[in-house]
Image (tube, helix red, strand yellow):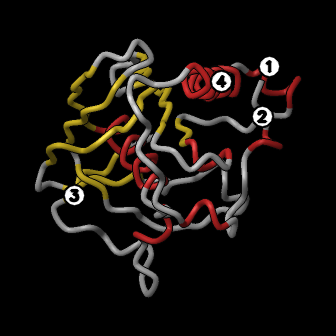
Amino acid sequence: MLTMNDIIRDGHPTLRKVADEVPLPASEEDKKTLEEMMEFLINSQNPELAEKYGLRGGVGLAAPQINISKRMIAVHVKDESGNQISYALFNPKIISHSVEKAYLTTGEGCLSVDESIPGFVPRYARIGIRGTDLNNKEIKIKLKGLPAIVFQHEIDHLNGVMFYDHIDQTSPFNPIPNAIAVER
């Protein structure tokens, strides 16, 4: 079972590397890792388990955050209607995106970043994703709002990009033109 001790912190070189594609069909070892990543997210959102194991609540996790430089992400988040969006994917790729932008009004956080880094992070408002699930099936999904933001955050990790790289350093709360403000 993954714990906070398995999550590497900002400054670790793996977080700045471009992760390797996962050879498909995925190995049993890679499947187990991805299942453990999803289990971590589910446990981290359960108040009793989070307290018992000392987990910070998370909605997304990328393999580089557990020091595995492979293109694997897990996302477990509710959309604006309260529907659970839950995906564990190998080699996820953004295949389409809106011109329109979106950002979280509260800013973004990250399990690998211990301190709060204030500022708006511009993201695409809507995205299309292609990836391979734990059953080795290629899937395509369309996302908007918070789930779209979470997927972009996690895919950034696969490319060595941290959320704060997107924040305007001179004016972190500068309104993002024509962007949808997403409440969390």
The relative height of residue 154 versus residue 2 in the rendered view (above or below) is below
Q: Which residue is mark 4?
A: 36
The mark nearer the N terminus, 4 or 1, is: 4
What element does badge 1 sit on?
A: helix
Q: Which residue is mark 1?
A: 49
Q: Position of residue 1 (x, y in %)?
A: 77, 23
Name the one closer to the observer, 50 or 73.
73
* In front: label 4 or label 1: 4
Distance from Cα at disc 1 to Cα at disc 2: 8 Å
Q: Is residue 11 left or right of residue 26?
A: right
The mark nearer the N terminus, 3 or 2, is: 2
* In front: label 4 or label 2: 4
Which amino acid type is marked by label 1?
Answer: Leu
| Name of the residue lying farthest toward the right | 52
What element does badge 2 sit on?
A: loop
The relative height of residue 28 versus residue 94 in the rendered view (above or below) is above
Which amino acid type is marked by label 4?
Answer: Glu
Distance from Cα at disc 4 to Cα at disc 1: 15 Å
Q: Residue at x 42, y 55 (%)?
A: 156
Whether the residues at callouts 4 and 1 have beta carbons within 8 Å, the answer is no
* In front: label 1 or label 3: 1
Badge 3 crowding class, 10 Å Cα cut-off, few under 14, some 14 to 19, many 20 or more, is some
Q: Residue at x 26, y 22 (%)?
A: 138
* In front: label 3 or label 2: 2
Quarter occupied by residue 63: top right
